[in-house]
Image (spheres, grey):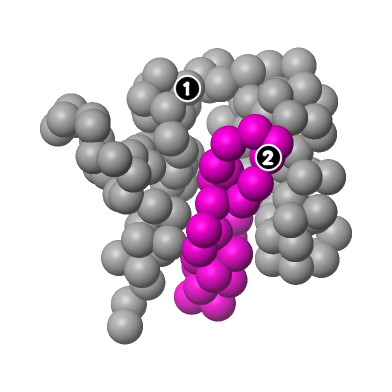
Amino acid sequence: MYVGTPWVAAPGAAHALVGLVDAGYRLAVVSNSAHGEMEELLVAAELCSTSGVFVPVATVADSQVVGIRKPDPRIFHMAVRALSTKPSLCIHVGDSVVDDVMGARAAGLTPVHIDPLGWCRSEDHAHASSLLDFATELIPA
């Protein structure tokens, strides 16, 4: 998750990713980045990478690199394959109802909508105010 342009990681993102990995979750990134190659941005922000630097992720499915954009289910399926699992066992967390929620659902993943201002009133998907809040709710105390 990011805030603004230029690309800046959302507050608490690093803590959330570390907590999820420490709790045993495997991670992948699916992005429609318009700010440059996403993995380079994630490494520069000291968040995660496929090489295991910082928090390890199975893949970074970057629309600029793979040529497929969310909400196309194929980009989500790339991440699922990299995780060696089934879509029904995956949760996709994102900030766009169309790209993230509808795309994840079309690919068979469970969507969670990051909505920091609480503007989305849709009851057909889960919401969290931030990635950190989502991770805190998911990880047992």
Q: Nearer the viewer, residue 27 or 77?
A: 27
Question: Which span is picked out in magenta?
Answer: 1-28
Q: Give the image location of residue 128, x and y in percent.
A: 30, 49
The magenta stretch spans residue 51? no
61 relative position to 76: left or right: right
Residue 115 visible here = yes
Instruction: Please name the residue that numbered disc 2 is placed on.
Output: 7
Magenta stretch, overall SS: loop
137 relative position to 53: left or right: left
> Residue at the location (59% across, 55% down)?
27
Q: Amino acid at mark 2?
A: Trp
Instruction: Please name the residue that numbered disc 1 is placed on.
Output: 99
> Residue at the location (34% across, 44% down)?
116
Q: Give the image location of residue 16, x and y in percent.
A: 50, 65
> Residue at the location (18% across, 28% down)?
122
In what element is the residue under mark 1? Answer: helix
117 relative position to 34: left or right: left
Q: Characterize the local packing of mark 1: few (<14), some (14-19) or many (20 or more) Cα atoms within 10 angstroms.
A: some
